[in-house]
Image: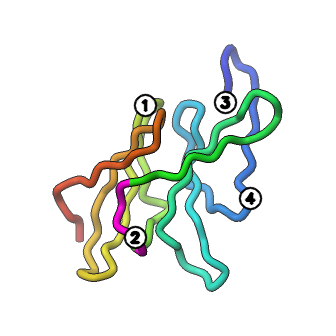
Amino acid sequence: MGDGGATSTVQLGALTYGGTYGDTVIGFGQPASGGLDGTVHLLRPDGSGGTTDTVVTGAPSGDGFAPTGTAGDATSAMVQYRDDSTDTWHQLVVDLATGPGHRSPSATP
C-alpha cells in the first residue's frame, strides 16, 4: 500500500483479515468465544507508523460477518453478513473513505 510503490503497514491486532482495497484493509472483529461479533473495521496507515481504525456503521447489531465475502475497489467494498433472526445473507456496501455501510436490498442463499 502507499503512493509511488512505497509500502505501508497496518496492524490487525485481534481482527481477521478481510481484504485490501486501495489504502484500506478490512478487518473483522472476533469475540473471545469465537465466531464473528458483527463489527467491520477499516484500517489505514496513519503516516507515522501507526494504524487508524474506523468501525463501519449500518449493519444490524449482533449479525455475523463473513470474512471471505468481500469485494471492492479503492472507494467502496461489499461485505456479506448473516441476519441471525432470519438466517439469511445480505450485503453491506461500505464507503471506505468515511465508514458508513448501506444494506443491499437483496439476500443471497
Tag 4–tag 1 contact (CB < 8 Å): no
Residue 22 at x, y percent in the picture: 54, 31
Q: What number is the disc on residue 1? A: 3
Q: Nearer the viewer, residue 23 or 95?
A: 95
The residue that appears at 23% across and 65% down in the rendered structure is 108
Q: Magenta segment, which residues?
A: 58-62
Instruction: Report helix, strand or loop for mark 1.
Output: loop
Discs 4/2, front: 2
Q: CA distance from mark 4 to mark 1?
A: 24 Å
| Mark positioned earlier in the residue sequence (4 or 1) | 4
Quadrant (top left, top right, bottom left, bottom right) of the C terminus = bottom left
> Quarter of the image holding residue 5?
top right
Q: CA distance from mark 3 to mark 4?
A: 18 Å
Quadrant (top left, top right, bottom left, bottom right) of the N terminus = top right
The residue that appears at 61% across and 81% down in the rendered structure is 34
Q: Which residue is mark 2?
A: 61
> Quarter of the image holding residue 9?
top right
> From the viewer's perspective, is residue 63 above or below residue 44?
below
Badge 3 amino acid: Met
